[in-house]
Image (tube, grey):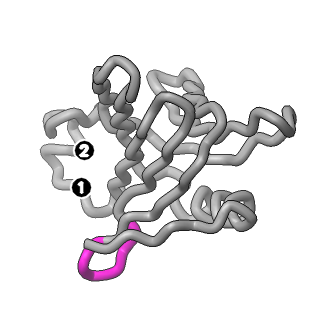
Amino acid sequence: MSNVTIPREQWDEFLVGFSEGHAGWLACLETHDTQTGETVSTRYLPFEQIALDTEDTKNARINVIVDSDNKVVKHVFFRPTRLTMQLSNDRKDESLHIESLNTSTTVRFKNRATLSLWEKAGEGPGIAAI
């Protein structure tokens, strides 16, 4: 596995392209709070978008949007400092890692087309029925 750090000036363009290429995939977020040491994780949910939000120029955010039971859920990462794409040995994008104020988050992706029937039925570990 190798890591590719995305230069900050390329985040917006990179995230737009990444979102377009992964729309409809499943995403799982694993967030580690660097202040408390707590780690929380979501189940795999349909991925909609990841975007750089610079509405507040002094406090940029990266927003990850997923669908949960027909509801849009937005995960907001405040003041991101580093964005890394983690690649598997076969060079397919496997996950994104976001360092932000007080958190370190990995967003893992699964292509629905590669899921087993067991996983598609929601029986796989951490996967919602699709």
Residue 62 visible in the snapshot: yes
> How far apart are labels 2 and 1 at the CA level?
6 Å
Q: Position of residue 90 (x, y in %)?
A: 27, 82
Q: Where 112 sits versus 103, above or below?
A: below
Direction top: furthest residue = 36
Name the element at disc 1: loop
Please identify the quarter of the rendering in which residue 125 is found: top left
Residue at 41 percent of width and 46 percent of height:
107
Q: Identify the mark at residue 120; answer none if there is no mark.
A: 2
Q: Which residues are magenta?
A: 88-93
Amino acid type at mark 1: Leu
Nearer the observer, 122 or 42:
42
Residue 130 visible in the snapshot: no
Q: Position of residue 123 (x, y in %)?
A: 14, 34
Left or right: 83 with respect to 111? right
Q: Give the quarter of the figure containing the C terminus.
A: top left
Left or right: 108 with respect to 120? right
